[in-house]
């Protein structure tokens, strides 16, 4: 664990590549914890008044990344929220450091094949509107692995149902929020 800011885990952030189930798992986890569910892509679409695909097409990816960065900086005020983050958000400079100050970071991951199964019929992700989307699914997660690996917990979501993954996430969250016992007699 790195970073010098004090850490108060008030929220839970799900990070990971597209199609690993962050939003579906996040909704279930939020219900289980009685927390509010937030999805960064949905929030940014609502703010911009257009889809992510249109933000990329009309304003460019750097503008989208700046919107993500600004949103992340607002999250330091959030409490009792489950945050599903866009797949590229952890790669933004300082985003992970900021998230870590207030949220437990849980990374969902899955094999390229499992991701492909989930996303192949979807058209709303601009980075997969590529002549070779499977190649993107193989190379982009590798490039981002140094960021994803900084999460507190990594869970393979490709081999489990949404509910099973959600249960694991909640279990890890409770572990992280439980004060470490100092043992009997150590006063
Ligand atoms: C992106 C992932 C998308 C969305 C945008 C860019 C990425 O979010 O933020 O299309 O860079 O991996 P999901 O991970 O929710 O699909």
Image (tube, rainbow, N blue to C red):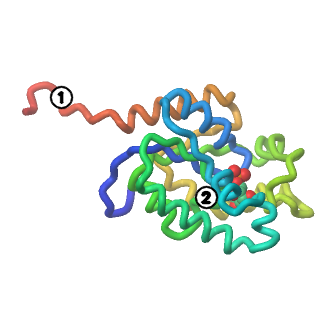
Determine the residue positioned at 52% across, 27% down. Answer: 32
87 or 65: nearer the viewer: 65
* Residue 87, position as x, y percentages in the image: 66, 55
Q: Looking at the rendered structure, which numbered label has been put on residue 42?
A: none
Badge 1: residue crowd in 10 Å (few <14, some 14–19, many ≥20)? few
How far apart, in angstroms, are the residues tagged by discs 2 and 1? 37 Å
The residue at which mark 2 appears reads as 145
Badge 2: residue crowd in 10 Å (few <14, some 14–19, many ≥20)? some
Say left or right for 85 vs 123.
left
> Is residue 141 something that shows in the picture?
no
Determine the residue positioned at 10% across, 32% down. Answer: 186
Q: Quadrant of the C terminus?
A: top left
Vertically, is 5 above or below 113? below
Q: Are marks 2 and 1 in contact (CB under 8 Å)?
A: no
* Residue 40, position as x, y percentages in the image: 62, 53
> Is residue 81 something that shows in the picture?
yes
Determine the residue positioned at 58% across, 45% down. Answer: 38
- Ligand 1 shows up in the quarter that is bottom right
Judging from the image, what secondary structure is the residue with disc 1 in?
loop
In terms of image quadrants, where is residue 22? top right
* Residue 134, position as x, y percentages in the image: 84, 55
Judging from the image, what secondary structure is the residue with disc 2 in?
helix
169 or 69: nearer the viewer: 69
Say left or right for 66 vs 124.
left
Mark nearer the N terminus (2 vs 1): 2
Residue at the far right: name it: 131
Determine the residue positioned at 52% across, 34% down. Answer: 169
Q: Quadrant of the N terminus?
A: bottom left
The residue at which mark 1 appears reads as 183
């Amino acid at each position: 664990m790195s970073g010098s800011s004090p850490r108060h885990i008030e929220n839970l952030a799900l990070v990971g590549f597209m199609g690993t189930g962050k939003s579906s798992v996040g909704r279930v986890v939020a219900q289980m914890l009685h927390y509010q569910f937030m999805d960064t892509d949905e929030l940014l679409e609502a703010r911009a008044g257009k889809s992510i695909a249109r933000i990329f097409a009309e304003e460019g990816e750097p503008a989208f990344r700046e919107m993500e960065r600004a949103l992340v900086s607002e999250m330091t005020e959030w409490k009792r929220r489950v945050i599903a983050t866009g797949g590229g958000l952890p790669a933004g400079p300082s985003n992970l450091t900021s998230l870590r100050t207030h949220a437990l970071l849980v990374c969902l991951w899955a094999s390229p094949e499992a991701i492909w199964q989930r996303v192949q019929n979807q058209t709303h992700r601009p980075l997969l509107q590529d002549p070779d989307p499977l190649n993107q699914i193989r190379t982009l997660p590798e490039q981002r692995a140094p960021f994803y690996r900084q999460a507190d917990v990594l869970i393979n979501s490709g081999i489990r149902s949404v509910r099973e993954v959600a249960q694991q996430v909640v279990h890890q969250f409770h572990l992280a929020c439980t004060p470490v016992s100092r043992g009997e007699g150590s006063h």
